[in-house]
Image: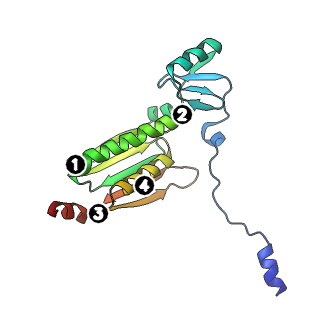
């Protein structure tokens, strides 16, 4: 009986991969103010911000601002990504709606955080697309939104091994979905 109590009191170590911190991903945070030469995002308070034109002029007049490249623009330049969505078996009647959904979701994500972007929507053929993103969470959220909007969709997620944090999401429209809608 005493052995049983001791078993639950001892902490058990479960080996989990530590999540990459911002320091590991981007290095030591820079001081001062920086402006991205590509997208004009401004770096201050240890993060990148999308600034309105009036605030940007005020910052330029008050502070010395260095020109740099933000991490999202650097990823795009280096052809890197953290999220990849492979969309298969897209019914022809939903392609326009799906395109608007993806681009609208990407625009709202960019409004909230200028480092969350859709890099590209590549159409492999008429019924298969690949969407790449700068953030792995953005890929997962887009896939969930597609599943929410288009009911008959299957979503499978796979993760890269540490220290990589690339997330690959496969979204498949179920084949019978197109046939059901043709009859109705």
Display colour scheme: rainbow
Q: Residue at x 56, y 30 (%)?
A: 49
Task: State the residue position of label 3.
Answer: 174
Q: Position of residue 89 (x, y in %)?
A: 26, 56
Distance of label 3 from label 2 (alpha carbons): 37 Å
Mark sitting on residue 78:
none
In the image, residue 73 above or below residue 19: above
Discs 4, 3 touching: Cβ within 8 Å: no
Left or right: 174 as drawn, with respect to 108: left
Q: Quadrant of the N terminus?
A: bottom right
Discs 3, 2 touching: Cβ within 8 Å: no
Q: Earlier in the sequence, mark 2 or mark 1?
A: 2
Label 1 crowd (10 A; few <14 / some 14-19 / many >=20):
few
Distance of label 4 from label 3 (alpha carbons): 15 Å
For label 3, the SS is: loop
Task: State the residue position of label 1.
Answer: 126
For label 2, the SS is: helix
In the image, residue 165 above or below residue 106: below
Left or right: 135 as drawn, with respect to 153: right
For label 4, the SS is: helix
Task: State the residue position of label 4.
Answer: 144
Task: State the residue position of label 2.
Answer: 71
């Amino acid at each position: 009986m005493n052995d049983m109590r001791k078993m639950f009191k001892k902490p058990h170590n479960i080996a989990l991969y530590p999540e990459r911190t911002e320091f590991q991903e981007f290095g030591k945070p820079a001081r001062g103010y920086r402006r991205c030469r590509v997208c004009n995002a401004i770096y201050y308070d240890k993060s990148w911000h999308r600034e309105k034109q009036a605030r940007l002029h005020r910052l330029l007049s008050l502070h010395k601002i260095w020109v740099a490249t933000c991490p999202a623009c650097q990823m795009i330049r280096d052809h890197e990504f953290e999220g990849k969505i492979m969309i298969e078996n897209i019914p022809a009647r939903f392609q326009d709606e799906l395109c608007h959904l993806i681009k609208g979701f990407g625009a709202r994500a960019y409004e909230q955080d200028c480092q969350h972007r859709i890099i590209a929507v590549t159409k492999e053929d008429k019924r298969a697309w690949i969407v790449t993103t700068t953030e792995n969470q953005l890929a997962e959220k887009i896939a969930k939104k597609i599943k929410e909007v288009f009911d008959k969709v299957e979503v499978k997620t796979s993760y890269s091994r540490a220290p990589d944090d690339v997330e690959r999401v496969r979204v498949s429209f179920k084949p019978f979905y197109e046939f059901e809608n043709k009859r109705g």
